[in-house]
Image (cartoon, rainbow, N blue to C red):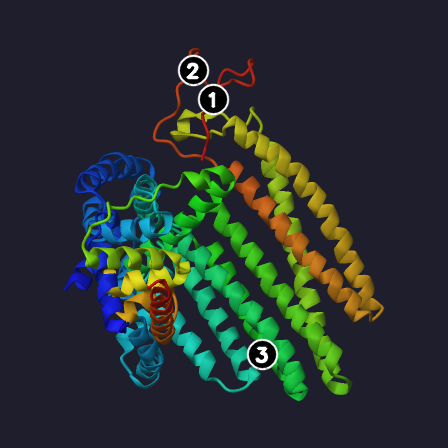
């Protein structure tokens, strides 16, 4: 049902340029996109700025028209918004690379460690996850945190369903190995 | 460590507060996005000026709601069904609406899709080329309909598609030359006949139109040149490939095309004289208010500049056309067909260019009908070119 609602909102934005419908899409995707970005930049303010930019760029893209007055062909909002988010993160790092010193200013916001063992496991998991390459981080986030199907992951990443499955499997195995080594 | 434990741990990461944006920021950002960026963008952006046609909306709906796999699976089936429906079905009404559809109509896109299918299913290069010629003819008919309906956008799109078909014919001719050279001469002959019909249709579109945009006149002239150039190019390809009796047939086609090109020069010559006459009479002295006829012939100062520039161009083009036409005749007399063909191509381009200039002159010297004579007023802000002639009235742009 969520998917149908999402498609309906996407249709209204594309055809009618409805800001109200776009607000509906924002409500559906603000959290996932923020998470997706935060996992890559590890900085709350940067994640907020990038997320804002992602939604504005998405709006502009959906309501833009080419010289012939044709709208872009968009089949899935999730595919588009994640793609824009990925590009925005790349741009962010490109900007930061200009000033190497800034790299050391990255503040990783972590909650104070809890005395409980389970919390400690989650921390280890979080740090291990962040050690993975971007592609693996993305698939694990989409699969287990956003609970997306392999078909959806494939659409978002622009690859086949089989390839999405294989990537998730490899990411999990690598994560497992990393966690076992830290124990 | 079990995989299930790991996946469970990853899921629980969602609960980490830093992995979720604060609800306050979310709400603030939502408001800012809507109130500032989007609202501002709506007022600036061109999207509100872009009206989507029914077909665009339908395509968007299909893209969003219908899975791509389903579209891909059904596309060949739909094309075959449409093709069979039109080929087998004898519903004259729908067939008529189908064939008379012009760019902008939903059925026009269906028609193009059907044609693509027909080409895809036709076996040999020769059949494909013949189909491209046939479809070029359809585009010419559509252009005529669009001109009759006063729809310059549709006529332009039809002519663009017509050119695409002609380009495919060019490619097809070369392929047939490779595949079955024995069929080449007959094909070139067919193309020549059909090209003549297409040119006639386009000329009728211009000549029979009650009102026609100068741009459309120019587009028709360009398209005709494109067709004539492709036809003679087809003959050139054939001439390179065949010998003996067949070559003689091709030479006849070339000679006929040369005659047509030279005849076009004569027409242009007559039009040049007419345009020069128009240009020379469109002087301030001519542009007078004629209250007796209850009409005013008025031409803007910018139109006068167009006329002056065009007159020079017309004269220059006329000289070039004459020189090229003479060169063509010389080559034909010396049986230098390839050289003659090259010159004919130049001649076609020149006559097309001259026709465009003539169209500009006609447009600039076209009298404007007004309901009542424009009264002379000393306070009239329009520039008065001839102070000695108080009846001269120059109004704003005629466009």
What kind of element bears circle 1?
A: loop
In percent of width and height, residue B280 lies at 62, 33
Asked where in the image residue B142 lies, by quadrant, the reply is bottom left
Q: So how many labels did they put on this image?
A: 3
Establish if B223 lies above or below B231. above
Along the viewing direction, whichever of B154 and B175 lies nearer the viewer: B175
Establish if B16 lies above or below B312. below
Q: Is residue B200 visible?
A: no
Residue occupying the point 28% across, 77% down: B92
Residue occupying the point 25% across, 64% down: A144
Q: CA distance from mark 2 to mark 3?
A: 61 Å
Provide the chain ID for the residue under circle 1. Answer: B
Q: Which residue is mark 1?
A: B393
Q: Residue furthest left?
A: A1
Provide the chain ID for the residue under circle 3. Answer: B
Residue occupying the point 51% across, 51% down: B217
Q: Which residue is mark 3?
A: B190
Rendered image: mark on residue B94: none
Q: Earlier in the sequence, mark 3 or mark 1?
A: 3
Q: Is residue B236 visible?
A: yes
């Amino acid at each position: 049902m969520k998917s149908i609602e999402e498609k309906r909102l996407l249709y209204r934005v594309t055809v009618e340029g409805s800001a109200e419908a776009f607000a509906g899409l924002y409500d559906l995707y603000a959290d996932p996109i923020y998470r997706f970005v935060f996992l890559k930049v590890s900085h709350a303010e940067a994640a907020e700025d990038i997320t804002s930019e992602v939604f504005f760029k998405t709006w502009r893209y959906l309501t833009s028209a080419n010289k012939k007055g044709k709208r872009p062909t968009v089949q899935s909002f999730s595919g588009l918004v994640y793609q824009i988010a990925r590009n925005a993160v790349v741009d962010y790092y490109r900007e930061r690379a200009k000033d190497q010193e800034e790299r050391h200013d990255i503040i990783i916001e972590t909650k104070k460690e809890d005395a409980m063992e389970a919390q400690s496991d989650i921390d280890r998991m979080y740090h291990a996850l962040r050690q993975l390459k971007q592609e693996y981080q993305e698939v694990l986030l989409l699969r287990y945190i956003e609970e997306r199907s392999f078909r959806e992951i494939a659409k978002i990443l622009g690859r086949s369903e089989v390839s999405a499955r294989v990537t998730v499997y490899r990411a999990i195995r690598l994560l497992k190995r990393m966690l076992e080594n830290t124990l | 460590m079990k995989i299930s434990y790991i996946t469970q741990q990853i899921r629980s990461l969602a609960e980490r507060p830093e992995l979720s944006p604060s609800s306050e920021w979310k709400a603030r950002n939502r408001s800012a996005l809507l109130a500032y960026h989007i609202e501002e963008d709506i007022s600036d952006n061109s999207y509100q000026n872009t009206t989507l046609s029914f077909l665009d909306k339908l395509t968007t709906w299909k893209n969003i709601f219908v899975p791509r796999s389903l579209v891909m699976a059904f596309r060949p089936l739909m094309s075959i069904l449409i093709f069979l429906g039109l080929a087998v079905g004898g519903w004259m009404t729908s067939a008529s609406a189908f064939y008379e559809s012009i760019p902008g109509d939903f059925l026009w896109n269906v028609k193009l899709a059907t044609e693509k299918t027909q080409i895809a299913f036709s076996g040999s290069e020769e059949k494909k080329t013949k189909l491209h010629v046939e479809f070029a003819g359809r585009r010419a008919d559509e252009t005529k309909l669009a001109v009759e309906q006063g729809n310059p956008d549709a006529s332009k799109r039809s002519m663009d598609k017509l050119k695409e078909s002609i380009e495919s014919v060019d490619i097809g001719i070369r392929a047939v030359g490779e595949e079955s050279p024995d069929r080449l001469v007959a094909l070139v002959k067919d193309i020549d006949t059909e090209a003549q019909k297409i040119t006639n249709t386009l000329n009728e579109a211009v000549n029979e139109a009650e009102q026609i945009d100068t741009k459309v006149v120019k587009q028709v002239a360009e398209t005709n040149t494109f067709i004539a150039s492709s036809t003679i190019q087809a003959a050139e390809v054939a001439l390179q490939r065949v010998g003996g009796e067949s070559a003689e047939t091709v030479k006849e086609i070339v000679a006929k095309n040369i005659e047509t090109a030279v005849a076009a020069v004569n027409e242009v010559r007559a039009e040049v004289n007419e345009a020069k006459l128009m240009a020379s009479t469109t002087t301030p002295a001519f542009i007078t208010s004629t209250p007796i006829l209850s009409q005013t012939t008025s031409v803007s100062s910018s139109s006068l500049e167009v006329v002056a520039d065009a007159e020079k161009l017309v004269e220059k083009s006329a000289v070039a056309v004459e020189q090229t036409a003479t060169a063509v005749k010389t080559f034909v007399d010396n049986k230098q067909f390839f050289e003659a063909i090259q010159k004919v191509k130049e001649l076609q381009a020149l006559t097309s260019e001259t026709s465009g200039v003539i169209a500009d002159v006609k447009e600039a010297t076209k009298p404007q009908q007004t309901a009542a004579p424009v009264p002379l007023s000393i306070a009239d802000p329009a520039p008065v070119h001839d102070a000695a002639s108080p009846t001269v009235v120059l109004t704003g742009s005629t466009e």
